[in-house]
Image: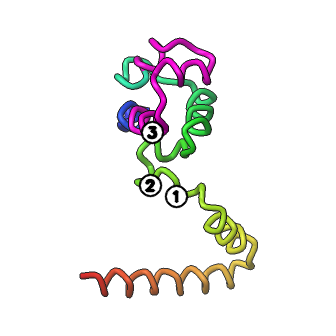
Amino acid sequence: MKLDFGNKLAECRKAKGLSQKELAHLLKTSHSVIGKYEREEMTPSIEAAVKLAKLLDTTVGYLLGENKQSSLLKDPAMLKRLQDIENLTEEDKHCVLYTVDNLLKAAKFKTL
């Protein structure tokens, strides 16, 4: 979990307006543990990382640096779309993703 976890954790905590002590209370731990997480002197367990993400309204993926937006998979409309795509046949899923990929390429090209 050394993928900038500490900085992401501190960023999300501050965005929620929480002190280390307040976050520690919600996580049922001590503020020194939160400080150690943020300084990356200590690595949280998977369970603690999941709880932290929920408390901070983000995802474990964001805290780990896997995605750049803290709320990417928190958007209910986006999640519904992804679930709908997941439930398609493989052929239909391929067609939808091919179309989305090409629309994204076109949109990115327009902004250049």
Residue occupying the point 43% across, 80% down = 104
The circle on residue 69 is 2
Give the class, few, some or many, for how many residues have Cα within 10 Å of label 2's Cα (few <14, many ≥20): some
In magenta segment, residue 28: yes
Q: What is the C-alpha distance between the residues marked 3 and 2?
A: 11 Å
Label 2 amino acid? Answer: Gln
Q: Is residue 69 above or below residue 107?
A: above
- CB atoms at circles 1 and 2 under 8 Å apart? yes
Q: Quadrant of the N terminus?
A: top left
In magenta segment, residue 49: no
Q: Quadrant of the C terminus?
A: bottom left
Upstream in the sequence, badge 3 or badge 1?
Answer: 3
Label 1 amino acid? Answer: Leu
Q: How is the image coloured?
A: rainbow
Q: Over which residues does the magenta segment extend?
A: 9-36
Residue occupying the point 63% across, 29% down = 47
Residue occupying the point 53% across, 87% down = 99
Please state the horizontal and vertical placement of residue 85, each as a whole percent of the image.
Answer: 68, 74
Q: Quadrant of residue 49?
A: top right
Q: Secondary structure at mark 3?
A: helix
Q: Is residue 15 above or below residue 43?
A: below
Q: What is the C-alpha distance between the residues marked 3 and 1?
A: 14 Å
Give the class, few, some or many, for how many residues have Cα within 10 Å of label 3's Cα (few <14, many ≥20): many
Which residue in the structure is indicated by mark 3? 12
Upstream in the sequence, badge 3 or badge 2?
Answer: 3
Please state the horizontal and vertical placement of residue 18, each as a whole percent of the image.
Answer: 48, 29
Label 3 amino acid? Answer: Cys
Q: Quadrant of residue 73?
A: bottom right
Q: Is residue 83 above or below residue 91?
A: above
Q: Is residue 82 above or below residue 88?
A: above
